[in-house]
């Protein structure tokens, strides 16, 4: 016989209450108001207080009733062997969810978790079915619903930690599906985890099938301490014409005590550059700023590292920095155009920093076909159709950008059919106040910048002259829909409905057709504040420019082809790519590269099959996983099963069927409580029947009186 | 009850149960009902009118009013004699009602206080008919209200009686002492109380009134339960005045109690008769007529000048 709540036995002290009352308390009597006690007080009497117990059966009834009720609250149950219990309940479907997030690498948690999982499997009977699911950010089904427990044990032994963070939902959803498919009546989910708070996001749809027992087995340590490099911020600056990078790192102490003399080290390309010593207060971050260094070569690999602690995985933070690259832009002016023909464009592009632009200006009749290849964007500033139209088309289809600015000299004719989204027509003269941009497609990347209120209004500029553009018949309709990216679309129209800006996508490049000039001849746009961001955004869009990421997080997916293209190394279609992971694994991809999921912390190397140079990217662990604060397993149990089925670690390690389950199945407390209530009723009936003359005090006239 | 049977023997007297009378809300109407019925039953009128008939001479005593000296007799005898007449004036009649908390006791619907009020109202009304001057004093452990005797004070007396409430502990000595100082002119004093004090203490308290030459009538009002002690349930008895409680088994105590109360009554009766004070034990179950009869006999006695 065991008790679920033995502390209730303290309530047995209340047994003394009826005894004390029985011995000491006078019964309540009717009070009679009498004019004067003058004569009554004169009558001598002797009081015999009862100091012996009368009515033994009544007292025994009262005591027995109280004892039974206390016993019921203590929740007694008979401990039975697990196997016997299991066999009596029929075969079970048990899903074991084993947390393999990197926080389980803390101390010997992983070994303990594996041991707990093995114990659960060993406690199963031959008829039970077991499923092993390893979970981190996602869930992986290792062994599904098998009675061959040796397979499950082997899978547990072969399981390894991942670099993922903890997320309970995927594992639980997988368990939910497996249990829903099961034909066995008794279902159970055993989750073995360190139950980090960060891993749980309440999800109402996540409910285990009714009747499922959820048993959390907590693998934890008392007051875990953990230092982590939580962030790195490389800041660029120019000193003496050279670009320098200053690295600032954040170190977070997740433990309950301050950590002194923490060595924070900055490594660049495997060499230690600088080490600093700091003190980190408990539950607080500290920051370290290293001396600036000059960026010599692209894809410089940096790591900020601190000394070892119980969780080594989050003690390093990787990043990759490259020297800033200028975005090459080629402005073509008409033949014999004056030098200031593209003055406004040139000045606008000279200001850019992210990225900086490298502007080359040539007259259109002096270019060679190879000149285009060195540039990412070509701006035809009021230039007539080039004789080498095919060169432009190839340039665009390979990812280049073409910005066609129409003025009075831009005569395109039929050449525009293959390249431009529309055919430039006659000059429209809007004398007087001029026209304005009226219908703007803010979903387009160029105009998206002006989408939010007070972020600039492109409609303020007045346009006095522009070229009429006749869109191709299908393109005009397609420009209205933004659900799918069409090959040709109208981005902006003037207030008279004429097309102001249109785009055509050819291959992986874009062509933008702008109906007016980008100088002071036909409009006042250059005077408006939106001019500079408009030009910058148009060039960035045409160049497919993306700010290079210094690092990624484990679990993210990267496209090797995209990395190679944006790095400027170039990638030929169908040439494939080679990805080297931090663990030394080689992922060879032929043809068009497919996305790769980052599953380890460190540096990935991506190289095109035909290129000798490579692109490096840094992958870091999810720093949220470093926070080892625990979730209340009762809360989790209640949320997913609707009833607390949990047990503590020690108890759960000892047995899969918890004492709560055993007690719930036996339900002795109910019978004891009913017996106590019946006895109380019996006592009331008997005492009412026995109620007679006054019992509390007996007064008898003395012999002398 | 001896007294009850004595009252019942009065020819023509109407015995109205006080409980029935209690339904009459108006004290004056109640008094009128009782007194008129009582008078109608008497064979001769109980009223004593003012008289100028000579009664007797008596020797002058220091303190006598010199205006009453018979100067003609002095001229003849050279001695001072006072000339006395029969009922040469109407009497002062004051009802003195005990309104201590013990008077609140009732075991049969009407409390001692209510009974006392009816009694006082009836007698005041009766006295008014007698053309006596009527006054009223109510006391507990002090004098609570005082209405000096006057021929026009019946309404005030009835009103004050009507409003009286028993709220405090009672005492006889202090209020009686104060009353004695008030009564300058002798008269009939009717004391209505339950007299829960030692007989000696009662006498000591009342003596100052007696010394003034007042004619005292004491109605000792008790509830039947106080006399018979017919309680059956073992209970805690709580003193109405002190709040003190004692557990009591009536079956064991009743006999003892009855003998004690009878001893008390006997002692009071004996003490009062020794001091020439009219004493009557009135049971609240007794009709009011009996009390009127007691008063009447006292009034008749007073009509003779002593």
Image (tube, coloured by chain):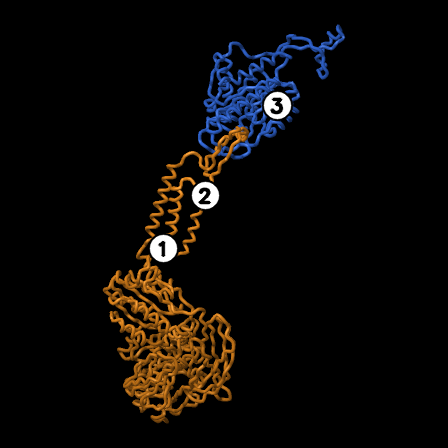
Between tags 1 and 3, which lies in front? Answer: 1
Q: Chain of mark 3?
A: B
Between tags 2 and 3, which lies in front? Answer: 2
In the rendered image of this protein, does residue A249 appear above or below residue B303?
below
Instruction: Indicate the chain coloured blue by its letter.
Output: B
Label for residue A381?
Answer: none
Q: Counting other residues with Cα less than 10 Å from the Cα at mark 1, is it few (<14), some (14-19), or many (20 or more)?
A: many
In this view, the residue in front, A598 or A696, is A696
Which sits earlier in the primary sequence, circle 2 or circle 1?
2
In the image: residue B288, left or right of residue A440: right
The residue that mark 2 highlights is A21
Q: CA distance from mark 1 to mark 3?
A: 76 Å
In this view, the residue in front, A291 or B265, is B265
Extreme-top residue of the structure: B76
In the rendered image of this protein, does residue B123 appear above or below residue A382?
above
Q: Quadrant location of residue A438?
A: bottom left
Label for residue A75?
Answer: 1
Q: Are marks 1 and 3 on the same chain?
A: no
The residue that mark 3 highlights is B203
């Amino acid at each position: 016989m065991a008790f679920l709540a033995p502390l209730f036995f303290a309530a047995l002290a209340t047994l003394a209450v009826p005894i004390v009352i029985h011995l000491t308390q006078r019964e309540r009597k009717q009070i009679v108001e009498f004019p004067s006690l003058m004569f009554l007080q004169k009558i001598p009497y002797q009081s015999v207080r009862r100091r012996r117990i009368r009515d033994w059966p009544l007292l025994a009834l009262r005591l027995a009733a109280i004892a039974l009720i206390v016993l019921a609250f203590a929740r007694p149950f008979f401990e039975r062997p697990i196997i016997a219990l299991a066999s009596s309940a029929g075969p079970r479907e048990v899903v074991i969810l084993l947390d393999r997030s990197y926080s389980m690498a803390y101390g010997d948690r992983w070994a303990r978790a594996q041991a707990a999982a093995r114990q659960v499997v060993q406690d199963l009977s031959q008829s039970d079915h077991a499923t092993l699911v390893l979970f981190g950010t996602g869930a992986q089904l290792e062994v599904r619903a098998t009675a061959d427990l040796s397979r499950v044990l082997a899978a547990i032994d072969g399981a390894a930690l991942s670099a993922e963070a903890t997320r309970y939902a995927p594992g639980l959803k997988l368990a939910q599906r497996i249990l829903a498919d099961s034909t066995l009546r008794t279902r159970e989910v055993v989750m073995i985890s360190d139950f980090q708070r960060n891993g749980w996001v309440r999800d109402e749809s996540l409910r285990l099938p009714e009747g499922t027992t959820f048993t959390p087995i907590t693998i934890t340590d008392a007051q875990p301490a953990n230092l982590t490099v939580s962030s790195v911020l490389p800041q660029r600056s120019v000193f003496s014409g050279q670009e320098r990078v200053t690295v600032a790192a954040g170190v977070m102490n997740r433990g309950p005590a301050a950590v002194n003399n923490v060595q924070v080290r900055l490594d660049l390309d495997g060499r230690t550059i600088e080490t600093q010593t700091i003190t980190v207060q408990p539950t607080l971050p500290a920051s370290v700023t290293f001396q600036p260094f000059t960026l010599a070569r692209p894809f410089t690999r940096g790591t900020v590292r601190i000394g070892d602690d119980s969780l080594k995985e989050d003690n390093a933070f990787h990043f990759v920095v490259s020297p800033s690259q200028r975005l090459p832009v080629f402005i073509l002016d008409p033949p014999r155009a004056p030098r200031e023909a593209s003055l406004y464009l040139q000045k606008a592009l000279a200001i850019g920093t992210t990225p900086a632009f490298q502007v080359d200006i040539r007259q259109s009749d002096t270019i060679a076909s190879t000149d285009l290849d060195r540039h990412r964007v070509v701006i035809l500033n009021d230039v007539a159709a080039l004789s080498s139209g095919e060169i432009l088309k190839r340039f665009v289809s390979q990812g280049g950008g073409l910005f066609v600015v129409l003025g009075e000299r831009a005569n395109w004719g039929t050449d525009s059919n293959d390249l431009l989204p529309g055919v430039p027509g006659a000059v429209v003269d809007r004398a007087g106040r001029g026209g304005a941009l009226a219908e703007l497609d803010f979903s387009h990347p160029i105009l998206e910048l002006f989408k939010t209120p007070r972020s600039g209004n492109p409609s303020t500029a007045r346009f006095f002259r522009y070229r009429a553009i006749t869109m191709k018949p299908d393109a005009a309709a397609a420009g209205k829909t933004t659900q799918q990216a069409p090959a040709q679309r109208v981005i902006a129209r003037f207030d008279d409905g004429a097309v102001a800006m249109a785009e055509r996508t050819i291959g992986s490049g874009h062509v933008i057709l702008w109906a007016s000039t980008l100088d002071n001849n036909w409009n006042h746009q250059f005077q408006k504040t939106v001019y500079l961001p408009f030009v910058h955004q148009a060039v960035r869009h045409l160049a497919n420019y993306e700010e290079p990421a210094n690092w990624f997080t484990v679990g993210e997916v990267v496209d090797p082809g995209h990395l190679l293209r944006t790095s400027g190394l170039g990638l030929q279609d169908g040439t494939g790519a080679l990805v080297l992971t931090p663990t030394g694994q080689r992922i060879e991809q032929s043809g068009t590269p497919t996305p790769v999921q980052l599953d380890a912390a460190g540096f990935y190397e991506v190289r095109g099959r035909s290129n000798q140079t490579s692109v490096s990217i840094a992958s870091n662990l999810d720093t949220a996983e470093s926070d080892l604060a625990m979730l209340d397993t009762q809360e989790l149990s209640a949320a997913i099963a609707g009833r607390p089925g949990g047990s503590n670690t020690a108890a759960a390690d000892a047995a899969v069927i918890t004492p709560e389950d055993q007690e719930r199945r036996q339900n002795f407390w109910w019978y004891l409580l009913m017996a106590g209530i019946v006895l109380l009723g019996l006592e009331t009936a008997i005492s009412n029947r026995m109620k007679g003359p006054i019992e509390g005090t007996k007064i008898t006239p003395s012999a002398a009186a | 009850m001896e007294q009850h049977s004595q009252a019942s023997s009065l020819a023509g007297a109407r015995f109205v149960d006080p409980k029935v009378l209690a339904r009459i809300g108006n004290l004056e109407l109640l008094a009128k009902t009782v007194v008129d019925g009582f008078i109608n039953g008497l064979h001769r009128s109980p009223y004593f009118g003012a008289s100028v008939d000579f009664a007797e001479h008596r020797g002058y005593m220091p303190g006598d009013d010199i205006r009453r000296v018979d100067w003609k007799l002095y001229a003849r005898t050279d001695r001072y004699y006072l000339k006395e007449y029969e009922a040469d004036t109407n009497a002062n009649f004051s009802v003195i009602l005990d309104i201590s908390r013990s008077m609140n006791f009732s075991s049969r619907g009407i409390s001692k206080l209510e009974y006392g009020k009816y009694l006082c109202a009836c007698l005041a009304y009766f006295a008014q008919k007698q053309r006596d001057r009527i006054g009223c004093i109510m006391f507990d452990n002090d004098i609570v209200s005082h209405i000096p005797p006057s021929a026009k004070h019946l309404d005030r007396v009835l009103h004050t009686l009507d409003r009286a409430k028993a709220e405090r502990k009672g005492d006889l000595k202090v209020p009686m002492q104060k009353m004695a100082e008030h009564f300058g002119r002798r008269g009939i004093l009717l004391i209505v109380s339950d007299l829960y004090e030692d007989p000696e203490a009662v006498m000591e308290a009342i003596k100052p009134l007696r010394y003034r030459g007042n004619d005292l009538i004491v109605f000792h009002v008790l509830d039947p339960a106080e006399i018979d002690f017919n309680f059956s349930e073992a209970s805690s008895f709580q003193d109405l005045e002190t709040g003190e409680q004692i557990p009591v088994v009536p079956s064991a105590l009743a006999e003892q109690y009855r003998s004690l109360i009878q001893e008390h009554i006997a002692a009071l009766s004996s003490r009062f008769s020794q001091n020439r004070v009219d004493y009557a034990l009135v049971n609240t179950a007794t009709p009011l007529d009996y009390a009127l009869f007691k008063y009447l006999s006292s009034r008749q006695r007073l009509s003779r000048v002593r």
